Amino acid sequence: MSSARKLLHALVLIGLGIGLTVPAAAAQAEPSPSELTEQINKASTELEKVVESYNKLNEQLKQTKAAATALSAKMGPLEAQLAKADTEVGQMASVAYRTGQVGTASALLNGSGPLADRLGMLDQLARDRKRQLEGFTEAERRFTEQKATLDATQAKQTAQLKELAAGKKKIEGDLDKLYKMREEAYGSATTSSGGYTGSIPSISGKAGVAVRFAYNAIGTPYVWAGESSSGYDCSGLTLAAWRAAGKSLPHNAAMQWDVVAHIGRGSLQAGDLVFYNGLGHVAIYVGSGKVIHAPQAGESVELASVDMMTPYGYGRVR
């Protein structure tokens, strides 16, 4: 083989080697820790939106159940009214069958006595019948109307329950993926900051109760849809803190925004709520430029700067 051909043969072999090994090496490239952290934060933000949507639907389901209970309570008396009116109409029909209303009317018209008196009796008989029939018709209308509303409310409740079940399944699937990412990046699916050991600021009134509760919750794990000492999500923590102070909040950041008094940054006081991510996240302000919040799945309740993210707005519990 000539020198030129040997050189060409060698170049072909090298080229084949490059073609076989370079793409394989590129395919095995692992994301850096910073890239994994970025992916985790993005996945956590998306998951929080899904969790808050779940929480909102759960709040709406509570309202639907309350409406159904109220409607059911109305149905009993309405059904009794309808039954009473039905009985009265039945009795009227029975009398008409036995005596014959035409015969009664004829007797009144053809009988003895002043005509004016007999006509008056006939008019009274007609009015009594009309009242009985109108009473039955109105009772039937009210019952039918409320029954239709109750049926629609119960159908809505059934649809909401199905939607909640689907939402729960999606959240659990997303959590599995997120925990695997965290384990790959940090060596553990969950981390904890531990309980708070510093001094808790002394704040008077109900706001002080809510703030003390939040400080004592530091280190509690993030649990989606959680609102108890076993775990909290963001709106579950603010709900629980203010519940301890005797105030009721819905379990959803956007719905909490709807029920608080909106204030400016300069008016912030301990106990106020701070909203983030287009009402997708909420924290409780504890003074000195700090908030306490339930960050994301895999982490625990923590103390952070009020500017940990760009605030959307500020609210005071009424």
Image (cartoon, rainbow, N blue to C red):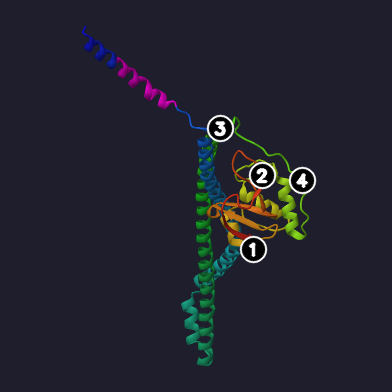
- For label 2, the residue is 301
Q: Which residues are magenta?
A: 13-28
Judging from the image, what secondary structure is the residue with disc 2 in? loop
Q: Measure the C-alpha gap from mark 3 to mark 2.
A: 21 Å
Cα distance in 3D space between marks 2 and 1: 26 Å
In this figure, which residue is indicated by the disc labeled 1?
266
Give the quarter of the figure containing the N terminus: top left
Q: Residue furthest front?
A: 3
Read off the residue under disc 3.
185
Q: Earlier in the sequence, mark 4 or mark 1?
A: 4
For marks 4 and 3 on the same chain, the one whose residue lies earlier in the sequence? 3
Q: In the picture, which quadrant includes the C terminus? A: bottom right
Front position in the image: 10 or 239: 10
Mark with earlier residue (2, 4): 4
Amino acid under disc 4: Gly
- Residue at which label 4 appears: 198
Q: At numbered mark 3, what does the secondary structure look like: helix, strand or loop?
A: helix
Q: Amino acid at mark 2?
A: Val
**Mark 4: few, some, or many residues within 10 Å (few <14, many ≥20)?**
few
Q: CA distance from mark 2 to mark 4?
A: 15 Å
Callout 4: helix, strand or loop? loop
Question: Mark 3 or mark 1: which comes first in sequence?
Answer: 3
Nearer the N terminus, badge 2 or badge 1? 1
Point out residue 260 in the picture as x, y percentages from the top left corner: 62, 62
